[in-house]
Amino acid sequence: MAEKKFDLVVIGSGPGGYVGAIRAAQLGLKTAVVEKDPTFGGTCLNVGCIPSKALLQSSEHFAAAKKEFSEHGIDIADLKLNLPNMMKRKEKIVSDLTGGVKGLFQKNKIETFEGHGSFKDAHTVVVTKNDGSTEEIGADKIMIATGSTPVELPHIKFDRDRIVDSTGALSFSEVPKRLCVIGGGVIGLELGSVWSRLGSQVTVVEFADRLIAGMDIQLSKDILRFLKKQGMEFKLSSKVTGAQVKGDKVVVSYEDMKKGGEDSFEVDRVLVAVGRRAYTDKLGLENAGIQTDDRGRIEVNEHLQTNQPHIFAIGDVIKGAMLAHKAEEEGVAVAEYLATGYGHVNYDTVPGVVYTWPEVASVGKTEQELKDAGISYNSGMFPFSANGRAKAFGMTDGRVKILADAKTDKLLGVHITGPNASELIAEAVVAMEFGGSAEDLARSFHAHPTLAETMREAALAVDKRARQM
Ligand code: FAD
Ligand code: NAD
């Protein structure tokens, strides 16, 4: 018999789990969280969004000081990289935020259990602590928020030294002279950018013929051009066939699928970033009779209920984009559904951002998706090179592209490559959430001079009346 009983037990304290637990507690549910790792916050806070953005910011400063400051009339005589201090700063940001989650749990009277959670049966979670001792907790409702873990290639095993996953590449103790990144997806481009800016010769090997599958093709071509200009190398349509560690070097062999034939090159380290898989290891799903799909993801219905109606699953462990904000919204939706009978996530307005330089951000449909669906649309585009603030920043790479319904002018998709694209996209998300039109954006005030004026100009361009500078 479980000693303690809760209205809701959440397994996992990532952005899905901790935000969902807080919302449940705010709505009056007696809530507990089980976390196996020593700190709260999951992948995102510990080894994902936050440490990667800390290093992206630091490396961006370093690259700007090296390559761009002189254009602003600032000469630095003896610029040096202090990697240990850069890493210390990243770790401090992480520990501040994971400590913050602990504080939020206390503030909201959420009981926490440190240990690995697994189902004993459909209403009991066993928590196995580090010392091997166990505790059983009873739950009326359960939210599975156990997240995801990096995919390991069967023929290229992680050795956590020369061949690493994203967690390893967030903590290299020195800048690798040459780094091979397997996978030209989000992690490959973000962490590849970090080490390229810090001095690595980075080569990205990507299976597909383009970067970031699913992104608007024009933006995908733009970002390839920008990253090449920064010194990164790309082998597209290429399949890595092996990576042999030889002393302190790794020989990477690959097959060029367009031209045919095998080749190889030598690097100091390899980052494998070929996707993530749902994490349900030792969760005991079978003890609760919970079904997974052919990719190991927990199956849910529109209310995020598993085949056991009192057990819910959210975030990276279910289908859909593996994004922190998607996990958060699902956590909130489950909590609200439990407390009120209503909970909803608008999957049509989930923004996606790649924090390269320039950044890439999009929401809604791409042109390709609209064409495939036979939806007629008007397109408006505006380049950052014609924006006064971007010129003042010295950051003119990129463009805003707005796609609106040809008949109703309703916003269907917004795609940006450019400075602060990650912030600019929020305007598009809100407009789309309200069912807004391109004209709504075009008629809204945008302070001058701001980067956001590119949004307004692109919206005007939908109606063919952009005003060039
Ligand atoms: P997770 O954050 O993975 O949390 C799951 C938690 O459950 C973990 O703490 C885990 O220890 C715990 N857990 C698992 N099993 C058990 C168990 N049996 N018992 C107890 N606890 C358990 N997304 C963005 O939106 N923006 C970004 O900029 C971004 N950058 C990223 C950068 C990197 C390098 C990586 C790897 C990911 C990034 N992501 C980003 C993706 C983002 O981190 C995930 O989408 C998000 O963390 C998913 O949240 P979650 O709550 O579903 O799972
Ligand atoms: P991804 O799915 O974004 O990219 C993986 C890439 O690897 C794909 O382009 C794929 O074609 C390629 N690939 C697969 N097998 C290959 C092989 N054998 N050889 C060469 N290329 C191969 O996955 P990721 O970059 O590992 O990121 C995982 C998840 O983390 C993503 O779903 C993403 O949503 C999330 N994430 C988000 C952010 C962000 O929001 N800024 C940042 C990092 C990670």
Image (cartoon, rainbow, N blue to C red):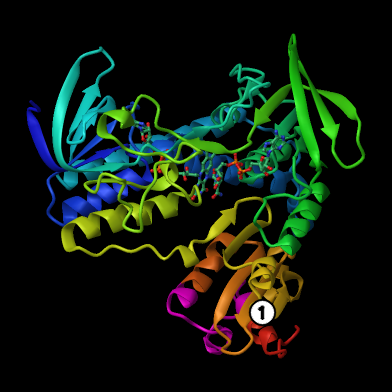
Check the image and report above or below for 140 versus 84.
below
Provide the residue span drawn in magenta.
430-455
The kind of residue on which mark 1 rests is Ala
Q: Position of residue 363 (x, y in %)?
A: 56, 65
The foreground one among 278 and 433 is 278
Expressed as whole percent of the image width and height from the top left, the position of residue 126 reads 21, 25
Between 191 and 149, which is closer to the camera in this rendering? 149
Q: Residue 152: tell me if it is visible.
A: yes
Residue at the image position 37 percent from the left and 37 percent from the top:
146
* 165 left or right of 127 in image: right
* Percent coordinates x, y for residue 283 in the rendering: 33, 28
Q: Quadrant of residue 318?
A: top left
Residue 271: quarter of image = top right
Q: Which residue is mark 1?
A: 458
Check the image and report above or below for 306 versus 287.
Answer: below
Quadrant of picture, ligand 1 = top left
